[in-house]
Image: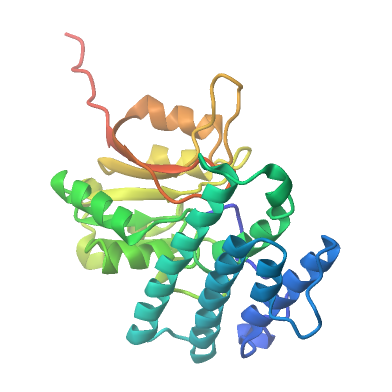
Amino acid sequence: DDERGGGFEGDDAVGAMGAPTFGAFRARLLLDTRRLLAQLGRPAGDDEELSRALSRQGAPELAVLFEAVALLVARVDACAMQQECRDHQVRAVRASWGQFIHALGAVEASILGPAARPFSETNWWSPLIMRWRYYVCSLFSWGLLTEGVVQEVAGRLRGLGVVGVVDPLAGSGWHALLWRDVGGLRTAAIEAFAQQPISWADVVVCDARRVEGWGLPPASFSGASALEAWALHLSWPPHSPETVGADLVRAWPGGFVVFLGERGDALVGDEGLTGGRAFLDVLEAGWEQVWRGDIPRWPGYADDISIYRRKAQPPPAL
């Protein structure tokens, strides 16, 4: 998962030695939201709850989304203080994640759906949504996966003989947790940036292009052939000129790639926000798409998820 970086660098949300201050992420979210409302000329009252202020100004959908993001961030605060997230807390986070996805869908429908509200009513929403997105991306993932999508993709992968997923741009490890706990797949997660606000799974801190055995436990890695039954999960690989996405696809010895990101529009020359044209060229040259599915999106983005299988090599010329 990448756009890129660990998030919250220089913030007071993380104190000395990386120890989080109690409630710091949620407090920062509230402060950011209050400041943005003031800058937008729609200030909340001094003692007014922010969700009430949003509803008062004609944005009840936005109020629900704000409450969902605030709850997610509060749950992260609780886990970060303990330096771990216990099983019952993870279950609560997963439930809150589902509520957030539902609230985000309602906001997207209000902005871009068939029955969208007039632009004059929603044109001030974007700065707030983009700031809240920063919290979700930094603490969870850039690409959004529902548990239903994870179950469907995992089922299709198992049907293709896949037993595990390598996430080489894992960020916080949220996708690795979903592949493992919801998808029932084995996982290996790698992330180049050491400072993450929270880790949802065991993440090897290393540039995935240099880690031995693609992060698999030694007992599971017996050479490149062991990865034939694994899929490479690339979620939001960074855009060109960064080459890590293309580098990983070129180096991947396994038979499958799961790509979560934008593809761009060839008609207008748009490369999208993930990977870029160079990455897509590498992917499309050596791999064939066998399935594509929709995922939740932040308004204005066009990412989806797909499974690619390595193209069969032509027989050698006689």
Residue 267 in the image, given as x and y percentages of width and height: 56, 19
> Number of numbered discs present?
0
Q: Residue at (18%, 17%) from the top-left corner? A: 315
Q: Residue at (39%, 84%) from the top-left corner? A: 89
* Horizontal side of residue 201 vs 143, given as left or right: left
Q: From where the camera sits, is residue 225 visible? A: no
Q: Nearer the viewer, residue 276 or 110?
A: 110
Residue 211 location, quadrant: bottom left
Q: From where the camera sits, is residue 175 visible? A: yes
* Horizontal side of residue 179 vs 170, given as left or right: left
Give the vertical position of 313 relative to 273 (above or below).
Answer: above
**Colouring rule applied to residues:** rainbow
Give the vertical position of 156 relative to 314 (above or below).
Answer: below
* Horizontal side of residue 97 vs 126, given as left or right: left
Residue 40 in the image, given as x and y percentages of width and height: 82, 60
Q: Nearer the viewer, residue 38 or 119?
A: 119
Q: Nearer the viewer, residue 100 or 289?
A: 100
Q: Nearer the viewer, residue 216 or 57?
A: 57
Q: Residue at (74%, 81%) from the top-left corner? A: 48
**Quadrant location of the C terminus?**
top left
Give the vertical position of 191 relative to 228 (above or below).
Answer: below
Residue 17 in the image, given as x and y percentages of width and height: 64, 85
Give the vertical position of 288 relative to 231 (above or below).
Answer: above
Residue 148 location, quadrant: bottom left
Q: Residue furthest top?
A: 318
Residue 168 in the image, given as x and y percentages of width and height: 43, 55
